[in-house]
Amino acid sequence: MLPSSLKCLVLVIVLLSGAGCATPGPPLYPVSAQEEARYIYVVRHEWHTGLVVKYDDIELQLWPEKEDFPEAFYLEEGWGDRDFYQTPRPGLGVLLQAALKSPASVLFVIGVPTTVTRYFPYADILEIPL
């Protein structure tokens, strides 16, 4: 039986290899002319990815911690291996540990005080309309 972390790694590799074959289709939920589109952002920071949501689009009863960031225009959420996130310059050893035998994981949230592109000028950003 394969360890669960190895199963996850294999699943990620399979999904990523198939992603190149995908073609964009029609939007699942088109915005009508009367509605203003809402956006989420997928932000890639080297080896990690975060999800960014506009502060005003987050319902307080679903995410009450948003009140911890009253000055934010957006909130970014990310998760991953604890040691990887806490290492200033992670190398191959920390990456392999994170992928194969992570001792612990973390969830982080940061308040973004400006536009997503201004706050993350060197990141790859995917804007997704909802």
Image (tube, helix red, strand yellow):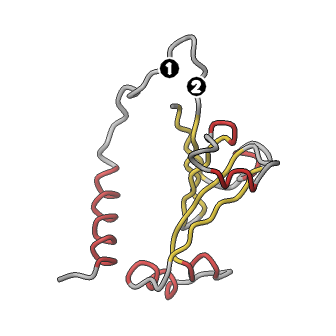
Residue at the disc numbered 1:
31
Q: Amino acid at mark 2?
A: Ala
Residue sitting nearer the eye, 11 or 18:
11
Residue shown at the point (64%, 44%) measured from the top left: 60
Residue shown at the point (34%, 50%) measured from the top left: 19
Is 13 on the left-hand or right-hand side of 50? Answer: left
Residue shown at the point (35%, 30%) measured from the top left: 25
The residue tagged with tag 2: helix, strand or loop? Answer: loop
State whether residue 68 is above or below residue 126: below
Report how far apart the C-alphas of labels 2 and 1 lie in the structure: 6 Å
| Residue 28 picture quarter | top left
> Which quadrant is home to the N terminus?
bottom left
Residue shown at the point (57%, 41%) measured from the top left: 40
The residue tagged with tag 1: helix, strand or loop? Answer: loop
Residue lying farthest to the top in this orientation: 33
Q: Amino acid at mark 1?
A: Val
Is 74 on the left-hand or right-hand side of 36? Answer: right
Q: Give the image location of residue 34, x and y in percent.
A: 57, 11
Whether residues under marks 2 and 1 lie with C-beta atoms below 8 angstroms apart, the answer is yes
Residue sitting nearer the eye, 82 or 121:
82
Residue at the disc numbered 2:
37
Q: Give the image location of residue 12, x and y in percent.
A: 34, 64
State whether residue 93 is above or below residue 120: below
Badge 1 density bin: few <14, some 14–19, many ≥20, Cα 10 Å: few
Q: Give the image location of residue 35, x and y in percent.
A: 57, 17
